[in-house]
Image (spheres, helix red, strand yellow):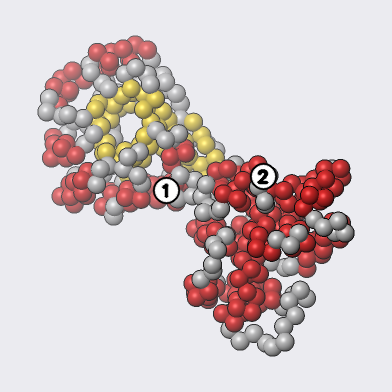
Amino acid sequence: MYGYLARQPIFDRQQQLLGYELLFRDSEQNQFPDIDPNEATSRLLSEHHLFYGLERITGHKLAFVNFAEDSLLYQFPTALDPATTVIEILESVPFSSELLTACRELHEQGYQLALDDYSFNPQWQRLMPYISYLKVDIRQTPISVLPDKLAQLRDFHGKLLAEKVESQTEFAQLQQLGFDCYQGFFFARPEMMRHKKLGHHQMHLLALIAEAAEPELDFDKLVQIMERDLGLSVKLLRFINSAYYARPNPIKSLKHAMVFLGAVELKKFIALVALSNLADTRQPELLKLSIVRARFCDRLLESAGQRDLQSSAFLTGMLSLLDALLEQPLEQLLQQLPLSDTIKDALLRQQGPLGQPLQLVLDYEQANWALCQQLANQLLPSNTDVRSLYLDAIDWAEQLQL
């Protein structure tokens, strides 16, 4: 499943980029779907901003985001950065005292507001002290009638933004009339953007992966998470039941199971389960390869006597194919996770104490035997059988049923 949106640039009088209007889409067809505007705004924020970040979509320029009545009254805009967001009040929003209060509060919090498709209706006068942009659709209000209309705005101190500008002639006429900003096909059509869509459950799983990178685990917090998810609980018990974890006594509770595993193995479990749930079911081999890499990196550090780095090495191997699994650039994905610089350096550049084991894994997979042996000589005792470690990793990945 993918998330879609379109962005249309907005320019100033010098035709310098000011920002983008972000337009919700639900398919590769570049048109607004037949859904409630409040739902469109909610999905735009949840599918794009909460994970991906609107600032990346706009290149840190202003983001003009449409808001319908309910999303304004319930203060949805406060999830966005007021320094980089312009809140567009849709033309379908009726004026009310509740709207006036909401706009005043948003203005006091530092947000810029825009009236979309401004119709020069006197009912909006009470809102003007809080408005930074008036967007005028020149298809609905032709340029020929604008001089008289604009005369009504002598006391307005914000910026005039012309929408649906389609020619050089229109652009020149609007400049003479005093418009400050411009948007339309003359400059650029809306540009479609697509990325792999992550639901709330998946974003929660990414948070679990981040938890696996913490120096100390909060067992009570993890128990609460597990208790709300039967699938996670079952998988934890199945993980402990594997042949790699011999136990003398039966497990009595989830916390007992976690304590029995210990922090190091529990971190591995969290990473395994989170990534397996994030992965597309059509990509089982990518997931299996991630698990093989994780186990191999873990065993390499164990053989090297660097036990303090084992759990980090495991996580590094697990995340090494995250970009392929989620179809997003790895650097952008890692910016969403509070991972150590050591792990990020390893994943992005194969550098640092975790980068060398990961590079050894990559060389082994690609049959670069000379480079593999060179790294093995640097990292491992002379009698280490790298092939046996890799076969162990394959066996371990095959046994897990996550």
Q: Residue at x 44, y 46 (%)?
A: 49
| Among the 4 quarters of the image, the one containing residue 231 | bottom right
Dot placed on the residue nearer the N-terminal end, 1 or 2: 1
Judging depth in this view, the residue of 49 and 223 nearest the camera is: 223
Mark 1 vs mark 2, CA separation in Å: 35 Å
Figure label count: 2
Vertical placement of residue 117 versus 27, above or below = above
Secondary structure beneath dot 2 equals loop
Judging depth in this view, the residue of 263 and 97 nearest the camera is: 263
Q: Is residue 246 left or right of residue 174?
A: right
Q: Residue at x 78, y 49 (%)?
A: 378
Can I make out residue 110 in this image? Answer: yes
Residue 190 at what x, y percent from top left? Answer: 46, 30
Dot label at residue 155: none
Q: Is residue 323 left or right of residue 139?
A: right
Residue 270 at what x, y percent from top left? Answer: 61, 65
In the picture of the structure, the residue carrying the numbered disc 1 is: 45
**Amino acid type of disc 1?**
Leu
Secondary structure beneath dot 1 equals helix
Residue 64 at what x, y percent from top left? Answer: 35, 36
Vertical placement of residue 62 versus 180, above or below = below
**Amino acid type of disc 2?**
Gln
Dot label at residue 351: 2
Judging depth in this view, the residue of 327 and 100 nearest the camera is: 327
Q: Residue at x 25, y 43 (%)?
A: 110
Q: Residue at x 73, y 51 (%)?
A: 357
| Among the 4 quarters of the image, the one containing residue 22 | top left
Can I make out residue 208 in this image? Answer: no
Mark 2 surroundings within 10 Å by alpha-carbon count, few (fewer than 14), some (14 through 19), many (20 or more): some
Mark 1 surroundings within 10 Å by alpha-carbon count, few (fewer than 14), some (14 through 19), many (20 or more): many
